[in-house]
Image: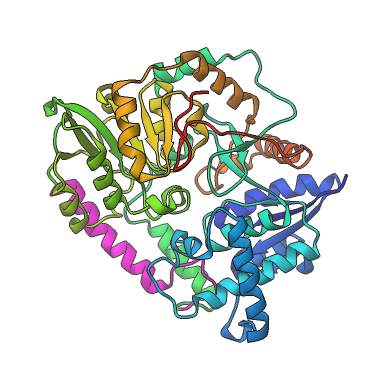
Amino acid sequence: MKKKVVFSSIFDLTNVFYEVSRGLKDIGHDIYWITTDNRWTNWLLGKGVSNGDILRLIYDKSDFLASTIKESVIGEIVKSEENADLTINQILMMDQFIKYKNMPDIMEYIYLYYHDIKKFLIEKQATHFFAEPTNSNEIISYMICKELGIKFAVPRPTRYPLKRMFFTDSYRDYKYHLRHDSDQGDVTGHELIKRCEETMPTPEYLAKFSKRSIIDYKKIMQSIRNRFIHKKVFRQKNLTHHDIGGRIKLQFNGIINAFFMKYIMKYEKLEDIHEKIAYFPMHVQPESSIDVMGSYFSEQLKLIKDIRRALPADTTLIIKEHPNFLDMNNYGFYQQMKRIPNVKFIKYDSSTFNVLQRTDIVFTVSGTTAYQAGLQGIPAITFSPMFFEGLSSVHSCTNICKLRALVYKLITNFTRDYEADCQFMEELMKNSYDAIWDSAVRSPHVLEPENVKKLQNAFLNVITTETEYFGNYNSYSSDRSPQQI
């Protein structure tokens, strides 16, 4: 049966999505696109995509909706919010290009997003929507898909095992789409966990980030070049790019911040800490893993204070900055953090493996460290529901008032269920795909013919399988207690 599939163009993932779309189109499925800038719109047109198959979310003030239409749209949005797991204002706080700017006309753009995306999906009779929810247009699209009953799917790397990917059903990495077949082979959950315990592999996307320079001359020049090409040097007709002033400010502040972190900041030594250890690795921010998935827990300084409040007196909270993103936070941020009682800051290049060997409990919003801890049977708490809650030692806490009870439960009365952990890993293998998912900028081999074919088959599997999800693990929300698998 023919499917009508929509792809949301997002920066350098667009050409990966396009290669996938070619395979789906070749076997008879209809393909449509939503874009947010002229560069990728023109790129798609140059590839032969029909003008009528693209919705451009590129606006001037002259495009703002008339008051009568807007009143109707506002009513529809409120109804959609009632049935969704988020609100428009929450979405605005998730979007790194909008957050804190307080743009005077921001809601006018949001009304246009909702109106035009909904109209486009209805007109095209969309059945499936693929996106990587990062910006407001993609998260609003998710909201509309829930409202209209359109299958929403997000391709994600599994993190571990390496070089595999799967599809989740929302802006969170929680419930994933089940496969109707499997390429698991003879590998067992026991073998997968053993390999991880022995090697502690670094997810491929993190390894790529390790090559990132503080001053990325290539990226700066490309950004300036694109603005001149599209004749929008200082002003963008969309919500998905920094203006040129913002880009320069980010780079300048980044140089100062990184210098401070490398040469001035004083760090504690792990070997000098003799108490029990709780570990919170800092998140890259702004970034969807915390701003989008974390939402209410995205203020890291506040979260660190809340974690400290929940810990027993004999436990020290140690913090480590992300080693590849030392330019994100300024001096004042760390000064405030170091004033929190019984919080110690260890050096950014400390081995995660060594830290975990000393750690009694791990905290993260959605980070891979909790996954690594879970594979070793170390208690871990995430503040966003995550797919790896299937591991017996990983729990999510979505109600900060219940954090203390969960912390004490895991520190004083936790026993790993190794068989459940093995079962989870086998389920993950069974429902993931042997394919690399990443942008072509970070991983050029993602566009190699063999990998493209694997991706095409993975996406095809999603659109030809009835919607089923694997999830509902150890959620510690306002109305649920921790449950073992």
Looking at the picture, tell me which residue is in the foreground, 367 or 50.
367
**Which residue is outermost to the front?**
479
The reply, left or right, for residue 462 in relation to residue 439 is right
Q: Residue 250, image x and y in percent?
A: 33, 64
Q: Is residue 255 magenta?
A: yes
Depicted 52 relative to depicted 294: above or below? below
The residue at the point 41 percent across, 72 percent down is 244
95 over 130 or under it: above or below: below
Q: Nearer the viewer, residue 4 or 307?
A: 307
Residue 43 in the image, given as x and y percentages of width and height: 66, 63
Q: Report if residue 472 is visible in the image.
A: yes
Residue at 55%, 23% in the rendered image: 424
Q: Is residue 288 above or below residue 484?
A: below
Name which residue lies at 54% across and 72% down. 238
Q: Quadrant of residue 100?
A: bottom left
In this picture, residue 168 sits left or right of residue 242? right
Give the magenta-colored segment's residue range: 235-264
Q: Is residue 248 magenta?
A: yes
Q: How many marks?
A: 0
* SS assignment for the magenta stretch, majority: helix
Q: Residue at x 63, y 82 (%)?
A: 63
The picture places residue 315, in percent across and down from the top left corner, at 19, 30
